[in-house]
Structure formats: C-alpha cells, structure tokens
Amino acid sequence: MKTVKQSSFFLLPIACCILLILFSSCGVYKFTDASVDPAIKTVRVQYIDNKARFINSQLSPNLTEKLRQKIVSQTRLNQTNNDNADYDISGEIREYSVTTSGVTSNNGQSQSSIQRLNVSVHITVINNKKEGEVKEYDVTRNFDFSANQSLQDAERALLDEMVRTLADEIFNRIFSNW
C-alpha cells in the first residue's frame, strides 16, 4: 500500500507540470487579445490632432505617443513613418468639455459637487493591404473630479489616467474586434 501512495504522491506534481506546459504552449493563455492579420507587418500612427473647442495642450502628444508604444509593445507590428504602412492610423480629439455631474444642496441652495471632464476621440484606420479599407471608431470617456478643484488642477491630476484609458480603449477597438 505504501508504494502506491508514494508513487501517486510523486506522479501528481509531474502530471500537473506536464498539463501546465501543454496548456501554455497550445496558446490557451494569451497576454493580450490583440488580433492582427498575419499580412499586416507595419503601422503608422499619425499625430492625433486636437480639434475640440477647448484644448489641453498635453493630451494630443501624450495620447499619440502612448498609443504608439502600446501598439509596438503588444503586437508584432513595426512602427514606421512611411506613407505605405500596412495600417495607417490617424485621429482627432473632437470633444473636450466640462459638465456638472453631481449637485448637492447646502442651506437650500444647490451647488456643484462633482465636475465631469468629457473627452471624445475619433480614430480612422486605413488597411492598405485590403485596398485601402477604412474603419472608423469613436471613443468617449468621462473623468470625474471635485468641483472644489480648478480645471487646471484636475487636468494635471487626470492627465495620466486620461491618456492611459483612451489609449487602451483605442487599442481595443482597433485590435480586439470590440
């Protein structure tokens, strides 16, 4: 009896290791859900213009660079500045506005408690491998901040989150077939 228990005790970890190797090598686990046609090799991410009525001067350059970095690090695509890139990605920030999101009552008077920064980006992807097939995406995100903060303070505090969130959403729209 002892030999059966001892041999099964040693076989269990070995079987688990084999299964782990098989599952990981079969592609069951993926680090990203990015799906890129194997024919696509290069990408050009053009500068994302800011065409909103109100302009945050840091948003366009930071968003453009973050999107470039994300595409290069999470796909096998090579960044190029050539006009003949397989994917040609361009975009523009169309909305950048502040609205009141929350209101509180203080001594019978209403006052704003939460402000919302609304950001909308329009993205165009041209697939030059498919005769210039064009896909367009709109990404809109809202970022709340205290009404006690000035807009400039809120923008400084929210910039990294805005850039990261918008870049992630744009990436997912383009490469994850959302």
Image (spheres, rainbow, N blue to C red):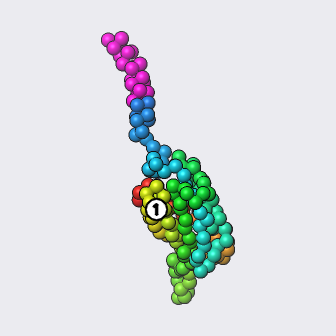
Nearest to the observer: residue 59 or residue 136: 136
**Residue under the point 46% across and 67% down:** 136
For mark 1, give the secondary structure: loop
Q: Quadrant of residue 91?
A: bottom right
Looking at the rendering, the stretch of residues picked out in magenta corresponds to: 1-20
Left or right: 132 as drawn, with respect to 58: left
Tell me: residue 45, above or below residue 104: above
Point 56% across, 84% down: residue: 111
Image position of 56 with respect to 25: above or below: below
53 relative to 168, above or below = below
Which quadrant, please, contains the N terminus? top left
Q: Is residue 10 magenta?
A: yes
Please identify the dominant SS of the magenta region. Answer: helix
Q: Quadrant of the C terminus?
A: bottom left
Residue, far left: 1
Q: Is residue 37 left or right of residue 58?
A: left
Asked whether the viewer can see residue 160, the reply is no
From the top left corner, tell me how far across and down residue 164 is, in percent. 57, 60
The answer to which quarter of the image holds residue 119 is bottom right
Q: Indicate yes or no whether the magenta region holds residue 75.
A: no
Looking at the picture, tell me which residue is in the foreground, 75 or 112.
75
Question: What residue does disc 1 label?
Answer: 132
Image spot of residue 171 (x, y percent): 50, 58
Q: Residue at x 53, y 69 (%)?
A: 121
x, y percent for residue 126: 49, 62
